[in-house]
Image (cartoon, rainbow, N blue to C red):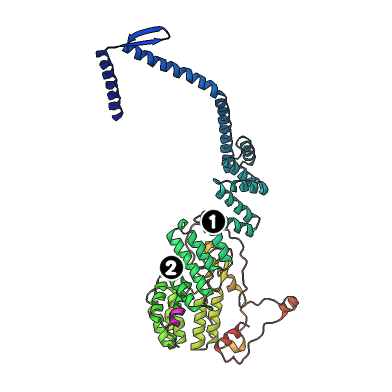
Amino acid sequence: MIRVVLFLVAVAAVAVGFVWFADRPGDVVITWMGYRTETSLMVAALAVAALILVVMFVWAIIRGILRSPEQVSLFFRHRRAMKGYLAISRGLIAIGAGDMRVARKSADEAARLSPGEPLALLLAAQSAQMAGDRGTAEQAFRAMSTRADTKLLGLRGLYIEAQRRNDMHAARLVAQEAVKIQPSLTWAGQAVLDDHCAATDWAGALVALDQMKSGLEKTDYRRKRAVLLTARALALEEIDRDASRAAVLEAVKLAPDLVPAAALAGRRLAENGEARKAGKILTTAWKLNPHPDLAETYANVKFGDTARVRLTRMQTLAEKTPGQLEAALAVSRAALDAQEFGVARTALAPYVSAPTQRVATLMAQIEDAEHGDQGRVREWLSRAMRASSDPVWTADGVVSDRWLPVSPNGRLDGYQWKMPLAELGFDRPVIEFTNASAAAPVEPAAPELAADPVPEPIPEPPLRKSAKAPKPKPVEAIIPLVHAPDDPGLDSGNLESGLDRDPVPETTTPPKGAWQRLQQLFR
């Protein structure tokens, strides 16, 4: 609307101008070289306008003739560039489709038509990677790293190629150079962070994490920083207790559910006599993530307490997470130490029908400490051998007896408290009971064991009613990392004779210690 109004105003102004000149006629006289030309003012104005138009037209023709070589060259360059871009497009599409022949052909064509073009260099590098030509790919990435517009892309490619040839020193140098150019670059910052973690340089790892803070989510940054602070606190535990305490307290603030940080903070505060603050940290972590390390630290938060006081403290902690197995185990263990066997049995009562290994082992300890009933002890230890596993610190298929900040594959915060085989998707015990054991002949009991009560058979779980039994998922073979503690294996030096020997019979005189008697059962 505004443009229409402006157009009408301009037309009106021109019309007013013509009317003004028409109402005021005049003459124009030109005398030049003896010639005299006389005409009206309007005709002179029109002649000047026509002359200007003719001059402009002639100048356009002359200018076009003068610039014709450049225009022709520009036309051919534009045509060549269009062919190059089309070749790049075909090549990138071929790489996505997995057509190596078309990709290499398009890369060669793009390099010929558009030499030095960033996308042409990228196509050459990726087509070489697809064909397995690492040298050509690295050469293309190195050429990109010399240009300002593709420097980071070239460094990224050089980093990947260095990793593929297992040259970690070169990969580290490339990542450090990329971080200097752009500190918030995620892949480079992560590479520098992993390098510091592999060298257990936790101070350098914290600096690297702060540099890549802008590229991380807030929760992810807080969790990683808490893990690094916990690792630094563990490293300083025997060197500088004050620095260790400060680091782990900051880690607890960042991630209250991080079990190693809460347990270490509880121990450091308890050493300084700050039992109340330690108990608050441990209770908060326990509500978020019940764990035996938290229970053990909470039980000993005050030095010099009696076993009954620790039992009361454990019962108070267990009330905060009712129905949790870890709470029942913590109360039962504290009750066993306090010689309150009834309380220990009551705590484990909901779990004895289908016990885990820790539940069965703890029941064996209760039987041994309360009655010394070796038959019941043997029964519970036998059930512990067949029971389902308990959660452990697991990362990358490796089981650790304690938490570690970095997994075996170099992943920060890789260790998780979970079942070792949980990721395989089983919804039933790893070792299943069959009726084959019922058909096996029963060996006569040893004379010294004749008075032991016969353990009740463990009933098999009822089968679900379904039209068709579900097929188990195919699972790759898993090689155990450690041998079972009760399976010492055969003597490799005398294999055949070891098969013929009878097991060592039990001694009629039991050892004095309680757990020495348990060890005697499995000799």
Kind of residue at badge 2: Ala
The structure residue drawn at horizontal position 32% and vertical position 12%, both measured from the top left corner, is 42
**Is residue 84 in view?**
yes
Query: Does residue 136 appear left or right of residue 13 in this picture?
Result: right
Kind of residue at badge 1: Lys
- Residue stretch in magenta: 267-272
In the depicted view, which residue is nearer to us: 368 or 126?
Answer: 126
- Between disc 1 and disc 2, the foreground one is 1
In the depicted view, which residue is nearer to us: 91 or 510?
Answer: 91
Crowd around label 2: few <14 · some 14–19 · many ≥20 (10 Å)? some
The structure residue drawn at horizontal position 44% and vertical position 19%, both measured from the top left corner, is 56
On whether residue 89 falls in the magenta region, the answer is no
In the depicted view, which residue is nearer to us: 168 or 498?
Answer: 168
The residue pinned by badge 1 equals: 180
**Is residue 429 in view?**
no
Q: Position of residue 189 (x, y in %)?
A: 53, 58
Q: In which quadrant of the rendered view does residue 255 lie?
A: bottom left
Q: Position of residue 338 (x, y in %)?
A: 44, 87
Query: Does residue 266 appear left or right of residue 146 in this picture?
Result: left
Image marks 1 and 2: residues in contact by CB distance under 8 Å? no
State which tag comes first along the sequence, 1 or 2: 1
Secondary structure, magenta segment, majority class: helix
Q: Position of residue 439 (x, y in %)?
A: 60, 73
The residue pinned by badge 2 equals: 255
**Quadrant where the image shows the N terminus:** top left
- How far, Cα to Cα, is label 1 from label 2? 30 Å
Does residue 304 lie above or below 211 as drawn?
below
Check disc 1 and report its element: helix, strand or loop.
helix
